[in-house]
Amino acid sequence: MKSYYQHLKSTQEFGEKPNLTKKPILRSSAIFPVVQNEFYSSSLHFLGYWLLKRNIPEVTLTITLRSMDGKILLRKIEIINTTKAFAIILRNLLLEINFDKNKTFIGSIETEFNTTRDMVFPYPALVLEYHNEKFNTCVHTLGRIYNDFEDLNENSEFSVPETGFDIYETDDLNSFISFVNGPLKNEDGYIEYTITNSKSKKLTGNFHLGKINPFETKFFHLNEHILDLSNFLDDESGSISLKHNFEGFYPRFLVGNIQNSFPSVSFTHSYYDCTSCTSDSDYWNRINDDHFDSAVYVPIFQNNNKFTNLIIYPNLSPSDFTLDVNIYDKNGKKFTENPTSFEIKTDDNRLLKINLNDIVSDLNLPESDTFTAHIITKFKNNKIPSRIKFGLDVGIKGLNSKLPCNICFNTRMGNPLIENKPGSFHWAPLFNDRNMILTLGNFSTQKNYGRDANLELNFYRIEDSSSFTEKIHLQPNSEQRISFQDFKLNEFIKTEGWITVKADNPYVQGFYFTMNSSGSVSGDHFF
């Protein structure tokens, strides 16, 4: 893990002093565990965003398919020189190598994007999807192979466990961990774990994974190594922290849960466990009276048996804070004269689940209306962790799928430098026939916020380079939701595509969700 301040510099965040010694990023890569079995398969999705965001006219993509043990099965090159939607379909790659479609495949797909201009980020914006006709689950880029020793050393400045996601263990639901090893052989993969259940009780232990070959894909169920996991979780979701000895790759794990009665998956990515991070660089020092310590907007889904929970994991640097929840309608009207507040002491190491539907219900607001939550943190003694990650669970009760989505997302730090940023650019995938919902909110860390946002929306599809543009306006603290019934999207995008959002405001945020008729919900934040 690199420090948060180093992250801001390396990604050239607005207002940061340029690093004159930074090497340009000419290779941007990611590596994904992929599965195809009798129930579902895997795909990768991306937009040719380099042409829009960086004015890079051409990007070379190398696709490498590997078996579970790390053997290269297929390697191919594509040129990205148009702004459109692209997909890498595992089923098609397996057809190219004559893989028996009746057999289960577990392996990896590595994507390497190369240019002659600086791409800034060493990891590209891709979406991994596991899917069949009745469900899908999505997460953005996670693991990657380092570009060089400088890249490795910069990201290995601090070694911390991975955490920040939901785990289940019942007769029907099983939790799993997956990752792809880097170029170094691990003679004996080793994990020490701390599990927190819904009552915030702890269970600790360790297990061995044995030898892990270079580029080997590991995919294992936690119940294979933690025999009393089901009893400890007691039919409720919990969380786990994983301290490991993996080296040579960026260890952002694919994590989630599998449902057996309705064969499906819900996954997300792991994140840093910062409970042992106590240096000066682990805390935010740009304290400003005009800004909250941190804040973030989230949509609330409540009608037709939908539910929305905010998850506070025991993953923060030592600190005490108050978490305030303010409720707004889609037009920016505030309904909470006094916010719903939660006192959190990280020394307690609690797993906290906040039911946002209950907060709306307590306000006696119409269930049919659309509401949002503005989550605000107020830290004590100026001890503000520089990395604050929460979980957002959205699901549907009473249908075949029992698993909500579990979005890992960060709050926005109260950074006064952002005030002068002229705008922002975001993008997200679009999937037809999935009851897709996009949410866009105009919320800020500023305490007295009154800035409008004008948004230019551009839509792209996979069939060709056609696109069209729409414009919308967001008042302060308001939200707009977009479905395939809007802007005749269902006519333009037949299978899949992308949306880009160009705003004249730096505080615009967004999420995307698919609400499958089976009850399966997938989602993630916008890039």
Image (spheres, rainbow, N blue to C red):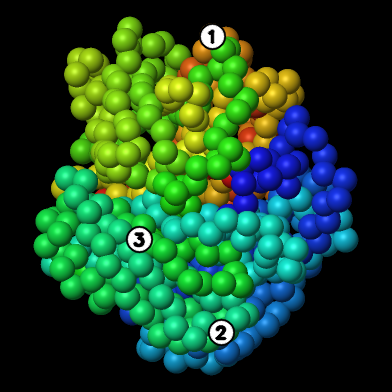
Residue in the image at 22% along x and 54% along y: 202
Q: Residue drawn at (21%, 27%), measured in percent from left and top?
A: 358
Residue 510 in view in this figure: no
SS at circle 3:
strand
* Amino acid beneath label 1: Asn
Q: Closest to the observer: 209 or 376?
A: 209
Q: Position of residue 500 (x, y in %)?
A: 64, 40
Question: Toward the viewer: 356 or 59?
Answer: 356
Disc 3 packing (10 Å; few <14; some 14–19; many ≥20): many
The amino acid on which the numbered mark 3 sits, given as a three-letter code, is Gly
Nearest the eye: 287 or 234: 287
Expressed as whole percent of the image width and height from the top left, the position of residue 137 reads: 40, 58
Spatial CA span between label 3 and label 2:
25 Å
Q: Residues within 10 Å of mark 1 (few under 14, many from 20)?
A: few
Q: Is residue 497 depicted above or below 111 in this figure? A: above
Which residue is tagged 1? 448
Residue underneath mark 3:
256
Residue at mark 1 to residue at mark 3: CA–CA distance: 39 Å
Tell me the quadrant of the picture where the C terminus can be found. top right
Earlier in the chain: of badge 3 and badge 2, it is 2
Q: Is residue 18 left or right of residue 40?
A: right
> Label for residue 120?
none
Q: Residue at x 34, y 45 (%)?
A: 314
Q: Nearer the viewer, mark 2 or mark 1?
A: 2
Residue 230 in view: yes
Residue 185's disc is: 2
Q: Nearer the viewer, mark 3 or mark 2?
A: 2
